[in-house]
Image: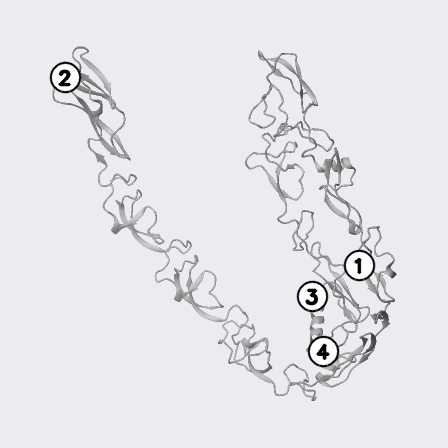
Amino acid sequence: MTPRTVALLAVSLSLVACGPPVTGPNATVPCVSASDCPRNLICSAGACVGPAGAPECTAGETRPCGPAPVGACAQGIQKCVDPGVFETTCPGQVTPVAETCNGLDDDCDGQTDEDVGQTWYVDGDGDGFGSSAPGAQTLVACSKPAGFAASNTDCDDSAAGFGIHPGAQEVCDAAQRDENCNGMANEGCGCAPVGSTQQCCAGRGTQSCEAHDGGAMLSVCSVLASSEVCNGVDDDCNGQVDDAFSIAAAVQLDGGSIETDGGCAVGVGACRRTGAAACIGGALACPLTPGTPGVEVCNGIDDNCDGQVDEASASLCAVSGQSCNAGHCECPAGQVACGGQCQVVGGACSVGVGACNRPGVMACIGSSVSCDATPGTPSAEVCDGVDNNCDGQTDEGVTITCDPDEDNDGYASNANAVQQCADRSRSAFGYCPTGYVSPSASHGTDCDPASPNRFRLLSTRDDADSDGYCVGYAAVECVGAAPSPWRRAAASCAATDDCNDSNATLYRNYMVRTDADGDGYCVGLAANACGGSAPPAGTRLFTDCLGDDCRDSNAQATTTCIIVGGYSSVSHTKLCGIGPPPSETTYVSTAAYCPFGFSLMGFRAVISAGGGGCTALTQNSLQQTCNFLEGTTCRVVGDCFAN
């Protein structure tokens, strides 16, 4: 790690770390020249730093590490260890884990129990089953809220509906209630003989056969259903024991050793295991097995699960003289681990001039304490405020010409050029530093020097629905990479203006007439209509109309709305017999022989040649007078009118 890297790291830590600032002799101090720095330190890149190879820290220094303290996350503390560097681990930190339903922000994103809850349904009668009524209240939560249930299958959730739910014992009652929500009432309640008895409520009660309304019906069970609890009894009479009981009620019976949300734990230290409580043998229990004890090490954890943390601390550290303190092996104050034992370090030293100056401290090098100061090597002069070639001068002959670029968008604010040090990381700006751009790399004059998102002039028009069709006059705006919202570069607008700039599917005017039934025949006068790739529905280009429509609600009716003689009773030919009766009435089919969309609106009777009389009585009946003639036929005909 170079001195410059050490300095930048220290500055970064001092700016972003939460908690107290880094302390110690190697903490960075802002500077302009070496005279601003403490003894044996140099000024490099605006900060006082030590020489190459200098220890990163000294005994007693600490710094925060780990994630930001959000939600369940917490920062740890790194300490300075042999040979003058911070620990690579982060003792004490709590890192993000997957979100679970526990009332904590486990993934440390600022939200608690997001996306892990379940839906609960309002339980108005408190029988453990939520309402099935449309629009009934629901809640999303990790644990059951008071007055809610996991199921929404209750067919009666009113105050009087306790005990009425799927699986409930059907009660034989005169009120004819459907207690088990199966759509039937008093099923299985018929009985014989009167006076006999039978078991009910899963065998816990009895009911008798009683005379009722001229028949016989079983009486109400002597044991009524109640809310299920963890007690080894089928309280709700559904044939199952200890199912769907209330954890909150069970915890009260348990005496409080299990959490109200059903969570429980066994074991201590590293052996602690957590999970969910269960009803076992009619009593609430924690069905978990503690972990296996391990060997105690210096880490702030009860590894051997004996209720103590880091006991016998002096025997847990490998370096002679160290003891275990809050999970860390530490030497006494003012000492560091060096050569397998705790030794005293400190003392400053430096050599060289300019960038060649290398201050250092007495530190653990190899297996012994010695000074780590080594003179630097001169290098080519670069524009960085440092005497790189160690000749007593700074930045001689290495500046470049730059124009101001206040918002750093690559467009020059003005042409007031100045000399600046090159920044090799900014090739797109001609290597000019932040706030400047090379005249050769500038994209032009900035139309808004104070905003990096606005830098060029562009002619634009309104296109609120972004369909490529524009409205209004073109205007020149100061924009960035793209036009302002709801506008478009005028050159990219479609050739015609938008007829509806609030709907992307409507953009072109058509000259149309109405054709509601789509038969090609139109009504009304031609008029303008706003459409998309085709005219609006129910219209047609006026040039495509086949003529005027006599009825625009019937695709079968075009230029005329009447079909003459559309009904016939020829299939019901009436032949008069010889002899009485002199007249007879017959009926014809009511089916009209009209096209779809037409109905028979009028009728008339016609008699064929040969004699006899034919009278239409109704639309589907006629009377024929027989004149003792054979072969006489009678027909009924009518006109079909469009519906």
Which residue matches tag 2? 630
> Which quarter of the figure is the N terminus placed in?
bottom right
Specify the amino acid type for callout 3: Val
Q: Nearer the viewer, mark 1 or mark 3?
A: 1
Q: Nearer the viewer, mark 4 or mark 1?
A: 1
Residue 559, given in percent of the width and then of the height, sits at 22, 41
Which residue matches tag 3? 16
Q: Which circle's residue, 3 or 4, is located before the other in the chain?
A: 3
Binning the other alpha carbons within 10 Å of mark 4 as few (below 14), some (14 to 19) or many (20 upward) gives: some
Left or right? Give the position of 629 relative to 88.
left
Tag of residue 535: none
Tag of residue 299: 1
Left or right? Give the position of 523 relative to 468.
left
User: Which is more toward the observer, 194 or 568?
Assistant: 194
Q: CA distance from mark 3 to mark 2?
A: 117 Å
Binning the other alpha carbons within 10 Å of mark 2 as few (below 14), some (14 to 19) or many (20 upward) gives: some
Does residue 222 appear in the picture of this structure?
no
Q: Nearer the viewer, mark 4 or mark 2?
A: 2
Specify the amino acid type for callout 4: Cys
Residue 245, given in percent of the width and then of the height, sits at 69, 34
Q: Secondary structure at mark 2?
A: loop
Q: CA distance from mark 4 to mark 2?
A: 134 Å
The image's colour scheme reads one colour
Q: Which circle's residue, 4 or 1, is located before the other in the chain?
A: 4
Specify the amino acid type for callout 1: Asn
Instruction: Determine the residue positioned at 70% across, 87% down.
Output: 390
Q: Which circle's residue, 1 or 3, is located before the other in the chain?
A: 3
Q: Secondary structure at mark 4?
A: loop
Tag of residue 31: 4
Residue 37, given in percent of the width and then of the height, sits at 75, 79
Q: Nearer the viewer, mark 3 or mark 4?
A: 3
Q: Secondary structure at mark 1?
A: loop
